[in-house]
Amino acid sequence: MPWVSCRADPRSAEIVLANVPLPVTFDRIAALIAAIGTGQFYDRVLALLGTLVDCERRLVIKYSRFAAPEFLVNESLDEESTRNYLGWLYRLDPLLRLVSEGNVPAVTTFAQMRSEDRSNAFYDEIFKSGKIFDELVLFLEAPGGAYIAFCFDHGSRLATPEEIAAFSAVEPVVAEAHRLHVQNAIAGGLGSIYGDRRVGVLVTDAGGQAIYRNSAWEATVADEQCADLVRLAFSVGQREPSHWHEHVLHWEYLDLDIAQVRSSRILFLESHAPGYLKTDIETALAAFCSQYRLSHRERQIVEKTMLGYPTSLIAEKLELSAGTIKNYKQRLYLKLDITSEREIFSLFMSHLLGHL
């Protein structure tokens, strides 16, 4: 159980230390401080936040400007779910929507992100149907317009006001530790933020000479191409993208008071991945149902099935018996040439993504 209680209003959150195992708490904070600038930093943040919420399913995800999201820590999804998320489901991720819109709060939940846009709301429900009832998230900004999200998934309940307030109370401490982590990580080679992952990183001095490059950059850019790529990046303004083959290149100044990187610039080379899905859901459903010649009633069943409704709830919503819904589903499976509800979702997403 959480070791704190807090006022429900995050703006005036106050940690109340009552029946608290203080040595454990201080150990987690000390471990976080000790991990600044190392590859263990994000694990330590996750461990500290884990003392504030009663939740075992947790993730750390990096959202980049152009590349697909990537897991830094995964203690929630199994191998198949991970493969589905990284393959295409990430395009329905409401956290990716926040990042792509440039509207990233320090602390939020899925319930607080509920969209009034029907398409976004529908995609949110599809995304949550993967056994996520609510998710409590703390965001940290990273260089290159990236965000590190610490996610705690609840399968059957909402995040409590006390948990949200606790995250909001500790966020300034974690954010400052992260600022120092980025500063130390850049001075030490950025391995703990970008390491061997998808985004290529090059740090140059004020004259454009390379100080550091990660293995992702080295694997993508040959030595003889590096100077040309640096010139291409600097031919446009800070944070403006340039295109190089299937990659997107952008750069920014390093605003750090460290002698070896002062006045330096950092370049990012990202594989361009499809972003958050912005297709109108009514148009998409109509096209799908037209392709497979589904009736109005069959469309209703498809829609509610994709939202995760069980047969009994679909029957209740449509004012039909459960047996009638089962009969409709059997005929629907024959039309779609599938054998299970899960395949309805996969077939719809294949149709949708194939027409973008």
Image (tube, grey):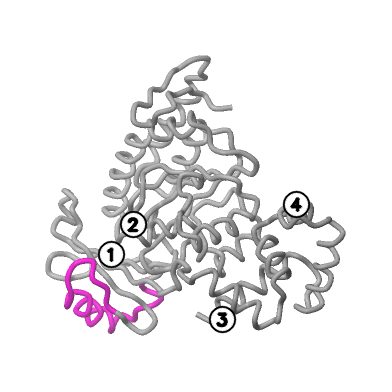
Residue that numbered label 2 is attached to: 190
Q: Name which residue type carries label 3.
A: Gly
Magenta-colored span: 217-242
Residue that numbered label 4 is attached to: 316
Frontmost of labels 1 and 4 is: 4
* Residue at x-position 34% and y-position 31%: 11
Look at the numbered disc 2 and give the secondary structure of its residue: loop
Residue that numbered label 3 is attached to: 354
Look at the numbered disc 3 and give the secondary structure of its residue: helix
* Quadrant location, the N terminus: top right
Which of the marked residues, 1 or 4, is nearer the chain's N terminus? 1
Residue 198 x/y as whole percent: 43, 67
Look at the numbered disc 4 and give the secondary structure of its residue: helix
Frontmost of labels 2 and 4 is: 4
Q: Name which residue type carries label 2.
A: Leu
Cα gap from disc 1 to disc 4, whole angstroms: 61 Å
Residue 330 x/y as whole percent: 84, 70
> Are dots 3 and 4 in contact, CB under 8 Å?
no
Q: Name which residue type carries label 4.
A: Glu
> Are dots 1 and 4 in contact, CB under 8 Å?
no
Residue that numbered label 1 is attached to: 212
Quadrant location of residue 289? bottom right
Which residue is outermost to the top? 19
